[in-house]
Image: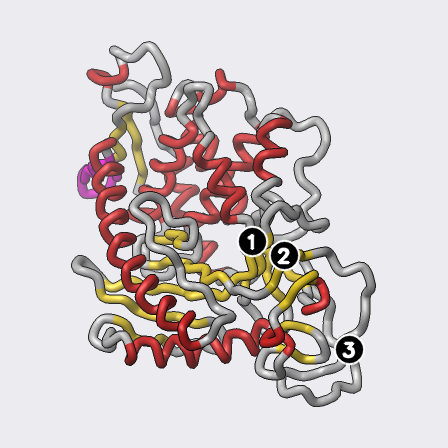
Amino acid sequence: MVLLAKLDKSVSSTLKGPVYTDFIFYCQFSSGKREIIFKGQQVDLRRQQISQIVEEVQRVVHHLTTEISLQDLRFQAVPYSDTYNGNIKVLAPSQFLVTVPVKGLVGYREAREQRWRYYTLRGTRLPCPLQDPEGLRQWLEAEQFMKSQWQWHEADVNIEGDIVPAKVLQVFRKLVENAIGTCHLSGKVSMLTQLSAVWVAVETSTCQVELELVPTVEIPTVWPEKARWPPCLKRWPSRQRVECIKSFGFALLACSNYHWQQSFLQAEQVLLNQLDEDGGCRRKCFQALRQMKEDVWCPGRRPVVTSHHLQTVLFWTCEKYPHPKEWQVFSKAFLRLVRKLHKCVSQHFLKHYFVRKSNLLQHASSGELDTVAQKLALFLKNPQIGLP
C-alpha cells in the first residue's frame, strides 16, 4: 500500500499566502486506487461533530459534578461554557479527559524538605521507603498550602501529612456512583471498571464516549521547578509569550497511587490559540495530522497516540523551525510533522514539552506503537505531496 497526498491546484494557485486551504489524500492499493477524501470541509465537519459531542458531554459533567459538590465540599462543579471549556480535553473523538477542580487548598508552595515515606495506602508501615516520583510526578503535602480546609487532613484522603491521589480517587469514585443515581442518569451514564482511574461511559446523540474524570488541584501563577522551560537561546515562542504562558501556572492530577501528575493544559491551550499570528499554516498542519491519525494511522476508541501526543509533536517542531517562512507551504510543513511523529513513535520516546525528563510514550503498548510506526513509514516512503 502506498499513501499519496495532493493539494487542490484550483484553490491553491489563487492564494497569495500559505498554500494549504484544500488538500486530498489518496490511498493506493495493488488492486486499484481508493480515495480517502480529506478536504478542508472534512476537517470542518469533524470540528462540528466534536463540538456537538462536547456540548452534550459538558451538560452531563456539569450536572454530575454539581451534585458531587453538594455532597462533598472538597470537589468543585465543572462550569458549563458556551465557548471553550478548559476542563474538557478531547484526546480522541470518543475519549475525553475531564479535570474536576478541588476546593479548599490555597497558597501552594514547593516542598523544601525531602522526607522518606514508609506507608502503604492502608496506612500500615513499610520496612523500606516508597520510590520517589519521577518525571511529571510529585508528592503533595497538606502543609504545602498556606490555607487548607480541615477535610484535607482527614484520614480518608491524608496519610502522614500527604494528600494521597489513590485515597482521593476512592472518595471521588463513590461520589460519582452516587451522583449518577441521584441525577437519574443511569440510562445515559455508566461507570467503567478500572484499577485506579475513574472512567464513565456517556451515551450521546451520535455515539458513546468515554470520560476519565480526574480530581485536579489547580495552581495558578506558580510555575513548577521541574518544568525548566524554555531552554536558553530558543526563538519560539517569544520571551513575552513565555512569561504569559507561565503566568497560567499548572495543575496536579490525581492519576496514580501515591504521586500527583503535573499538567499544563492551560499553558498548552495558550500556545495552540496563538500558533499562526505570523500567518503560517501550523494549525492546518495539526488538523491534517490529527485527521489522518484518527482515520488511517491510529483509529480506535482508546488510541495509543492521542491528540495530546500530536500537540506535543507540533510544539517541538515549532521550536525547531521558529521562522514564519518555514510554515508558509502546507506540503513541506505537513511532511515535517509526519517525520517527527514517525521518529517519536518508532523510538517509543516523546519528551513532554515542558518537563523534558518525562517520556509521554513510556507506558504505551510497544506493539501498538510499532503498528502506527509501520503505517507512518508507508506514508513517508512515497507521499507525493505537491501540486497535480
- Structural distance between the alpha carbons of marks 3 and 1: 26 Å
Disc 2 element = loop
- CA neighbours of label 3 inside 10 A, class few (<14), some (14 to 19), many (20+): few
Reply above or below: 252 against 285.
below
Horizontal side of 325 relative to 177 (left or right) equals right
- Label 3: which secondary element: loop
* First to last magenta residue range: 26-38
**Residue 129: numbered disc:** 3
Which residue is at 58% across, 59% downward? 252
Three-letter code for the amino acid on which mark 1 is drawn: Ser
For the point 26% across and 12% down, the residue is 13
Q: In the depicted view, which residue is nearer to us: 22 or 50?
A: 50
Q: How many marks?
A: 3
| Alpha carbons under labels 2 and 1: distance apart | 8 Å
Identify which residue, 45 or 310, lies in the foreground.
Answer: 45
Would you place residue 107 above or below residue 354 in this image? below
- In the picture, the quarter occupied by the N terminus is top left
- Residue 230 percent across, percent down from the top left: 66, 36
The C terminus - image quarter: top left
Choose the circle earlier in sequence order: 2 or 1. Answer: 2
257 inside magenta stretch? no
The type of residue carrying mark 2 is Leu
Magenta part, dominant SS: strand
